[in-house]
Amino acid sequence: MHKRITAISFSICIFILTAAAFSADIIKTEQVTISLQQQFETVRPDSNSALAIHFEAQKDWHFYASEKTAPGGQNLKITPSKVDNVTFSAPIFPAYHLYTDAVLEEQIEVFSNKFTVYLPFKVGALSAGQAADIKAEIKIEGAMCSGEKCLMPKFPPLTAAIKVQPDALMDKPAFALPEGPAALPKIENEWAGYPVWIPLLVAFLAGLTLNIMPCVLPVIPLKVLSIFEQARQDRRTSILLGSVFCIGILLFFAILAGLNISLHLSGQGSFQWGGHFQNPTNIIIMVVILIALALFMFGTFEITVPSFLSGGQNSKGLTGSFAMGFFAAVLSTPCSFGILTASLLWAQTQNLFIGTVGIMMIGIGMAAPYFILTSLPNLLKFMPKPGRWTEIFKQSTGFILIVVALWLATALPADRFVSVLYFGVILSFCLWMWGSWVTFSTPKPKKYIVRLIALAILIPSGIFLLPKPPKSDIDWQTYDAVKIKEAIDLGRPVLIEFTADWCLNCKAVEKFVYGSRKVSRFIKQKGVLAFTGDATQESFPAAVDLANVYNEFVPVTIFYVPGQAEPVRLRGVLFEGKLLEILNKLPDKPQQEKFPEADTNDQKQN
């Protein structure tokens, strides 16, 4: 027993000593741990080796991979010091992944979680029998960001002690270098042990299930109602319109297949199913379309195609069937990613031909029920005959469309969510004007005037409400009466913006005043302490003080200027000029760095 314990202890000691020999410095901060590892414990003269720099970032924190998209060009950079007799090659970075930045509203290349950067080097020749201990410092730079803030930490350099001995074995490398820079991770094929037809069948069944998804289910009645109309026509027309509807579905999946092919050929890796709904602009477009379709289902307005564009009733039907099929496929994607993931992953690991067939099988599965129904019109005999119930059914689906629109809108940032809801109300009003204020017999001049007024309301509202709010550099702090009084007593300029979620004018103030780069730059330059007072509910502290202390209503800005007994009150919306005039008279404060430095005291451990 004692011999066994001694042997185990000895093995543990050997393991610790070996690990220590392969490890150099370790940097630890609250956001990341960085360690250094050498490929060989000792290297021979005139030989190749490498360093591995291991990163372990905390949850939600990441480095930027691309200098083009990193803030201020501060992507992750690895720079070795110049050392005699050692030549470093360019660092080999891992494959990045895409991160959707909620502020910039775009996808950015980042490194996160655990990843490794390799730094190859070559040791030069030494005199016969000579050994050397070479120290090299590795400088690490780059911004670190999370969903809430960014840091520009000043990491101490990592130190690598490279031991050079003429008789070094170099037969047991601690790690192997990747084949090339930014080697893309391979997606494991979970279907490797199955025949090809099985995952293709799964893809077909996945396409079938899209027809019962809550995202696409509201669209089906539109097509079902048109099928009832087609039953009155000949079989040839029914087959033609049904086929065009299916072609619209297949076109969407053909676009996905083409994207998959282009990514394979360019070496960019795979795409994420439903990734287009990570972009707020795409979500807003879908929400607006769904609201408009809901109003169409309610009978608020009708969609007609001029005869000179449609070329006749049959052409109009073909265009409508094709568009409805394509829209049904697009609308299915946000809530179908779970079912489709397995099929898409399989398709992306196959050759281009099989992968394309796999993606198209999803579209074929979705289109199959419509093709069968329209190709065999006799099946319609078993369906209930059209009547009052069809109109009730049609209007009921309008409410489902609104629910789906709200569900999609919840994925938007809070400020844009409210703006989209306002625009949805305005859109509903304008479409109501368009379809209900005039009739078929209304004289054309009056019809044009009413619809021009509707457009005159809708277009400016969309320009004002839908674009992304301008990015502000103002460091807003939550309303705190104690902190405000302390800052005023210390002679600091203090600005308080009182706002509320239900206040449309408050949104205008944020857009036209505090969204101004000149205003935000002056507030930062002058060292103004900015607070935002949320008066959405009357019980909120800011709302209580707004009524009892300041006797004001939103929107209003209270500006305490040093040396003045009473604060300046800026009411209304368009007070940018007056605010700039006040700010311009204040003395400048020393410029602060864009990124606060991380606390690096006692962060370096040997």
Image (cartoon, rainbow, N blue to C red):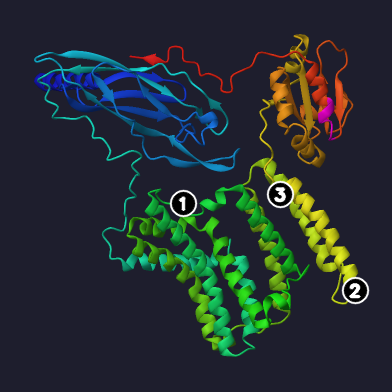
Q: Which mark is residue 443?
A: 2
For image coordinates 66% across by 28% down, the residue present is 473
Q: Are marks 3 and 1 in contact (CB under 8 Å)?
A: no
The range drawn in magenta is 573-578
Q: Secondary structure at mark 3?
A: helix
Residue 299: give x, y in percent of width and height.
76, 70
Q: Is residue 423 above or below residue 582?
A: below
Identify the image quadrant of residue 439: bottom right
Q: Position of residue 227 (x, y in %)?
A: 61, 80
Q: Which residue is mark 1?
A: 272
Q: CA distance from mark 3 to mark 1?
A: 26 Å
* First-in-chain label (3 vs 1): 1
Secondary element under disc 1, as helix, strand or loop, is loop
| Quadrant of the image containing the C terminus | top left
Residue 126: x %, y % from top left:
15, 17
Question: Residue 197: within the magenta?
Answer: no
Q: Image quarter for residue 489? A: top right
